[in-house]
Image: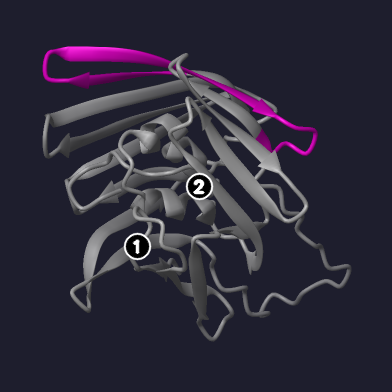
């Protein structure tokens, strides 16, 4: 999400199946609890004229089952609220675009095995309104392989041995992501982050980043995926939790020359 617009971002959405180990030894009641991995705030800083400036802040709230229930940003006064049904999900995204003013988008989908396969969205801005359909396909491991947005834009995901290749049809977007060793076992899929700072218009809506935040777009890849046009640095707190990801350009690709910091705040 940019400072003044929700449009503009790239694309990843695989949502998550990490097994939780269970100890065979009973714990005493006074055993210390594990530190929370529930991220309640994400701050995004961008390097401008040698200074890192705050671009956006995301505040996340969760329901009693640990699911994202609300996402709010202080920049552009944009907010997303989620409603979970039995085998369904809906969310409402409201904000202000600097060019076209106030907009409201709604997304609804039935879930099969916890995943969206077909969904629809409508977007209202002023007196104009548009409706879009989404269709998703997954492989045997549950990872996203194909997605179609609005019947005219589609994305193909090729999960290779060394990297993930994402290509769009028509060919307006392609990217390669390397498999890192940084765990992606937090309260939402960290692979949403690269799309929040991408400058290409409408990809955030097309790629449905907010459904990815809700964890309903396939199996989450268990590690952070690194765009090969950047180098990454990771900082952890005393409890081993990520507190900062640094994303620095590593190529001469014109649209990938900005440096970003992602900072995390955890709940109690």
Q: Secondary structure at mark 1?
A: loop
Residue at (34, 13) in percent of width and height: 131
Q: Nearer the viewer, mark 2 or mark 1?
A: 1
Residue at (81, 63) in percent of width and height: 22
Q: Name the main secondary structure of what is drawn in magenta.
A: strand
Residue 136: x and y in percent read: 60, 24
Residue 220 seen in this snapshot = yes
Left-right relation of 20 to 152: right
In the rendered structure, are the residues bearing label 2 and label 1 in contact, judged by CB atoms less than 8 Å apart? no
Which residue corresponds to mark 2?
64
Compared to residue 99, the image places residue 189 above or below, namely: below
Q: Which mark is residue 20?
A: none
Left-right relation of 218 to 74: right
Along the polypeptide, which appears first: circle 2 or circle 1?
2
Residue 195: x and y in percent read: 42, 48
Which residue corresponds to mark 1?
257
Task: Answer with the quarter of the image where residue 69 lies.
Answer: top left
Residue 86 seen in this snapshot = no
Residue at (54, 68) in percent of width and height: 36
Outermost bottom residue: 238
Q: Residues under labels 2 and 1: Cα distance?
A: 41 Å
Q: Nearer the viewer, residue 215 or 192?
A: 192
Q: Nearer the viewer, residue 107 or 7?
A: 7
Local crowd at mark 2 within 10 Å, few (<14), some, or many (≥20)?
Answer: few
Residue 245: x and y in percent read: 46, 70
Residue 249: x and y in percent read: 42, 67
Task: Answer with the quarter of the image where residue 57 lies.
Answer: bottom left
Compared to residue 174, the image places residue 22 above or below, namely: below
Query: Which quadrant is the C terminus positioned in?
Result: bottom left
Span highlighted in magenta in the image: 120-144
């Amino acid at each position: 999400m940019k400072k003044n617009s929700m449009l503009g971002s790239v694309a990843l959405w695989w949502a998550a199946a990490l097994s939780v180990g269970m100890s065979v030894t009973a714990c005493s009641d006074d055993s210390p609890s594990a530190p929370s991995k529930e991220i309640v705030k994400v701050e995004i800083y961008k390097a401008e004229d040698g200074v890192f400036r705050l671009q956006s802040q995301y505040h996340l709230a969760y329901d009693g089952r640990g699911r994202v229930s609300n996402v709010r940003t202080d920049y552009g006064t944009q907010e997303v609220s989620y409603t979970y049904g039995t085998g369904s999900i809906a969310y409402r995204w409201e904000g202000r675009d600097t060019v076209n003013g106030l907009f409201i988008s709604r997304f609804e989908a039935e879930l099969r095995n916890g995943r969206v396969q077909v969904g629809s969205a409508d977007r209202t801005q002023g007196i104009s309104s548009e409706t879009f359909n989404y269709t998703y396909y997954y492989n045997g491991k549950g990872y996203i392989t194909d997605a179609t947005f609005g019947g005219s834009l589609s994305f193909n995901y090729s999960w290779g041995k060394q990297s993930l290749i994402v290509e769009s049809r028509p060919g307006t977007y392609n990217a390669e992501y390397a498999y890192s060793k940084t765990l992606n076992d937090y309260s939402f899929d960290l692979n949403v982050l690269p799309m929040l700072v991408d400058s290409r218009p409408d990809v955030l809506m097309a790629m449905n980043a907010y459904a990815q935040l809700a964890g309903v777009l396939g199996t989450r890849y268990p590690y952070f995926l690194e765009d090969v046009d950047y180098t990454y640095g990771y900082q952890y707190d005393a409890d081993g939790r990520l507190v900062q990801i640094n994303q620095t350009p590593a190529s001469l690709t014109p649209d990938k020359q900005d440096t970003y910091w992602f900072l995390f705040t955890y709940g109690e």
